[in-house]
Amino acid sequence: MNQLDALKQWTTVVADTGDFKQLDAFKPQDATTNPSLILKAVQKPEYAPLLQDTVNQFRDRPLDEIMDRLLVRFGCEILSIIPGRVSTEVDARLSFNTNATVARGERLIELYQAEGIHIDRVLIKVASTWEGIQAAEQLERKGIHTNLTLLFSFSQAVACAQAKVQLISPFVGRIYDWYKKTAGAKWVEADMAGANDPGVQSVKQIYDYYKKYGIATEVMGASFRNVGQITALAGCDLLTISPDLLAVLAANDAPLVQALDASKAQTLDLPHVFFDEAGFRLALNDDAMATEKLAEGIRAFCVDAIKLEQLLLGA
């Protein structure tokens, strides 16, 4: 049994890509996209007609609507291949606007439903800012399920649990990147690998807390830099993995053991935590890594959203 098949025994494997032509090989349950992944995909010749067709059909509509229609077009293609759910992201420029995020999430769902897609097959991706988490809480109350992304801290995970969101995506690789860059020459890769990886430890802390307190929100580790980070999280609810790393797992027959275990987490002595808005903002502010990576992630997604708009305008 290869490591990908072994991982599927304990963890739902999700493909992290906008390139839906790669999906068949790995048989993932779900798939996730974001503006950067869609931008990457539409610049490939095989996807250019899809972008052009969307623009031709809806040229008279506002640019933000054409963008959403393109995202949904990709989502529908992905859903024709996978059995589970696709995550589609709200424009990152709305990350600090609760009402606009709710409105955009509702529109994305309406566009999917117009294509005959059931509401339960879509997760609306929202940045884990305070405003984003409040928007997700409102969307969940309307029966629209959410995936809270750009999540780097325990405080963000607790606030998401309080909001009863469907799923969170803690970013393993970007946490690792920050600690490695901060340590500089002092970083020893071998000492910080596997269970000692700061990104892995962050997800484990969140997973253990959720399972200890029976929190229904799903934990999906995301943003991996190497296979060691993935295997160290075997047993997590879900893991969203790039096609490159899925291929590495599929080609490796080394034994894989379950690393995270809900029944063990329930025996841990962990304090219960609650955050109101002021407490959340202070806790996030106290975490330099999370503060920097959240801001950086939103900026990067905004840049790619603008690039995608330019491609639409030029089509």
Image (tube, rainbow, N blue to C red):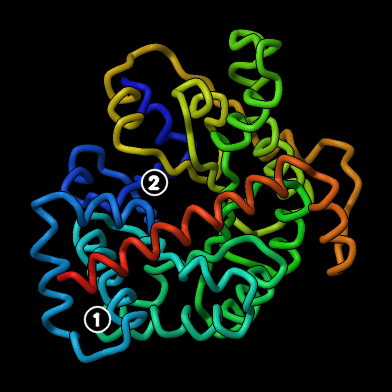
**Which quadrant does the N terminus fall into?**
top left
What residue type is disc 2 on?
Answer: Val
What x and y, as percent, mark residue 105? 47, 78
Q: Mark 1 Cα within 10 Å, few/some/many (few <14, many 20+)? A: few
Write down the residue under mark 2.
14
Q: Residue at x 58, y 60 (%)?
A: 148
Q: Residue furthest bottom?
A: 60
Q: Residue at x 73, y 33 (%)?
A: 264
Please give the label number shown on residue 116.
Answer: 1
7 up-or-down from 98: above or below: above
What residue type is disc 1 on?
Answer: Gly
Relative depth, front residue between 4 and 108: 108
What x and y, as percent, mark residue 103? 51, 86
Relative depth, front residue between 175 and 81: 175
Q: Secondary structure at mark 1?
A: loop
Q: Is residue 155 left or right of residue 233?
A: right
Marker count (numbered) = 2
Q: Mark 2 Cα within 10 Å, few/some/many (few <14, many 20+)? A: many
Quadrant housing residue 47 = bottom left
What is the CA distance from the residue labelled 1 to the residue labelled 2?
22 Å
What x and y, as percent, mark residue 25? 19, 38
Q: First in sequence: mark 1 or mark 2?
A: 2
